[in-house]
Image (cartoon, rainbow, N blue to C red):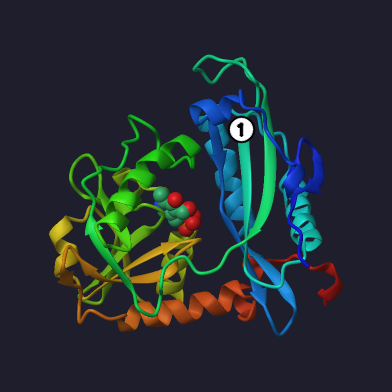
Amino acid sequence: MATPYAYFKKQIIPLADAKIGVMTHAFNYGTAVFEGIRGNWNDEEGQVYAFSLKEQFDRLRKSCRIMKIDFPYENEELYSITTQIVEMSGYREDVYIRPLAYKSSEVLGVRLHDLEDDLLIFVAPFGPYLDIEKGARCCTSSWRRVADTGIPARAKITGIYANSALAKTEANLNGYDEAIMLDERGHISEGSGENIFLVQDGKIITPPPSSDILVGITRDTVMTLAREELGIEVVERDIDRTELYTADECFMTGTAAHVTPVVELDHRPIGDGKMGPVAARLVKLYFDIITGKNPKYAHWCTPCYSKVKA
Ligand SMILES: Cc1ncc(COP(=O)(O)O)c(C=O)c1O
């Protein structure tokens, strides 16, 4: 039986024992930054491969700089803690690894300075997030993406997820799978937990970081694969809402969502209302890579189970 473990207050302990006090600053004010890392189960090898550890921890470090959170950890130390807790947890399925650097002082007062910081990492089982084969039916959200002048989206701050939660719940309660938010200028920004791409006239187009997106790691991965494996030009530019209505294809990317086609937006089918050929090729490539089945990209995958290491 798998039992989840966590790294908490500089020790590895069962997740059930990792508890924070109710006055913890991050819990009261949203002053934490985090990552979502997938550990992907490879059944043939009996291995869990953690995907893009370097990129994830590099982004966490940047988020910490923005939020003035001390982060005195070397990458090698972080990889070692991560693989250890995954191995000790013993899941034989896909898992989610959640590092969270947070303002740990138990004091009242809204600020970022004169507070203690800590790091926790936990692991939990995590299956599919959206139905990739069927694709997602989306709406344009009535909630705008928070601007860099409000809460910077390039930092994965817990507090900013109130914005995503408002959009996601509105979409789900109105019968859609996912919300697509516009930025304050009215251009396409991103989903509640995914970056957006469209395919038009043989090119792939995606909003730039200045559209208040979280600069996604899956976004970077897919841009690399599109250019290097499919030979398709990728352009980062502002996108209008109605460009999605007339796109040949649209898809979302994210650690949770992988590559999920958007088959309908605001009751208009996109393309022929099914997964398009570019998305289909990317989905296949991406899954092979994240489960450690494509040797060319093995450097993006870290095996967690030492007993089955070559
Ligand atoms: C708001 C938001 N945008 C985009 C993404 C996709 O980022 P990544 O591919 O790094 O998971 C996520 C998920 O982490 C997210 O929460």
Position of 43 relative to 171 (above/below): below
Q: Is residue 197 above or below residue 56?
A: below
Q: Position of residue 214 (x, y in %)?
A: 41, 48
Pinpoint residue 36: horizontal percent, then vertical percent.
56, 53
> Which of 303/231 is in front?
303
The picture places residue 195, in percent across and down from the top left corner, at 37, 57
Indicate the position of residue 16 as horizontal and vertical percent values: 73, 47
Amino acid type assigned to the residue bearing label 1 in the image: Tyr
Identify the image quadrant of residue 22: top right
In this rendering, would 29 be left or right of 105?
left
- Residue 140 is left or right of residue 97, and the answer is left
Quadrant that contains the C terminus: bottom right
Tell which of 89 and 306 is nearer to you.
89
Tell me where residue 47 sits by quadrant: bottom right
Report the residue marked by disc 1.
Answer: 102
Q: Image point 32% across, 38% down: which residue?
A: 146
Q: Identify the residue at horizontal 35%, vertical 41% (top origin).
A: 163
Considering only vertical position in the picture, is 17 above or below 82? above
Residue drawn at 61 percent across, 77 percent down: 296
